[in-house]
Image (cartoon, rainbow, N blue to C red):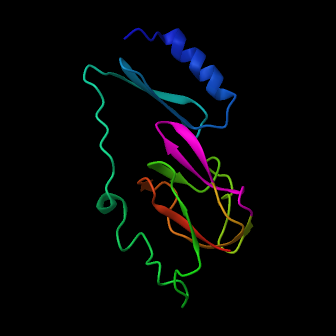
Amino acid sequence: MDLTNADVADILALLDSLPYDKLDLRTDRFRLTLRRTPAGTWTEEREDLADPILVTPATDEAVASPDSTPDLTDMSGTSGDGLVAVVSPLPGTFYRAPRPGAPPFVEVGDAVTADTVVAIVETMKLMNSVPAGTPGRVALIRAQNGDSIPLGATLMLIEP
């Protein structure tokens, strides 16, 4: 591995100035994972990658289960008719807030515009903002923070 201790120290100095608690860096040659401890120090894991990384898309069965995803027809006596779905633009990890510990972008009942960011989907370590897409009120949030979601999954429903 060509990554030196000085390289890691430079990365840690940069991370100390940012609000993040974890960095997962992958290249063709190595993987480096850095995590901030509650005391403010960093732990480090290094891994040489001799074999290519295989990415397998998630299936609906792996992502959703009856216990974790509510039935769209079970919304306090209303049906899903007339509600607009906010769908995932990419497969990835769903986040309700901009960073750990921050308040969620939206809650059920909040008013939104078409451009209101309602969530983030992290794909390949890139954070992708998800806009509401329509004005209205948040009627239901289906995905849970940290859920692995497939492309096109309904993240929440908006009542226009």
The x and y percentages for residue 62 are 31, 58
Please state if 135 lies on the left or on the right of 158 as rendered: right
Residue at the outermost left position: 51
The x and y percentages for residue 91 are 44, 49
Please state if 70 lies on the left or on the right of 56 as rendered: right
Task: Name the residue located 45 percent from the left edge and 75 percent from the top edge.
Answer: 70
Question: In this rendering, is residue 142 above or below 34?
Answer: below
- In the rendered image, which quarter contains the C terminus? bottom right
Task: Name the residue located 53 percent from the left edge and 9 percent from the top edge.
Answer: 6
Name the quadrant containing residue 65. Answer: bottom left
Residue segment shown in magenta: 113-130
Residue at the outermost bottom position: 77
- In the rendered image, which quarter contains the N terminus? top left
Q: Is residue 54 magenta?
A: no
Q: Is residue 121 magenta?
A: yes
Question: In this rendering, is residue 121 above or below 154?
Answer: above
The x and y percentages for residue 52 are 28, 25
Dominant SS type (magenta): strand
Question: In this rendering, is residue 46 above or below 130?
Answer: above
Depth check: 97 or 139 in front? 139
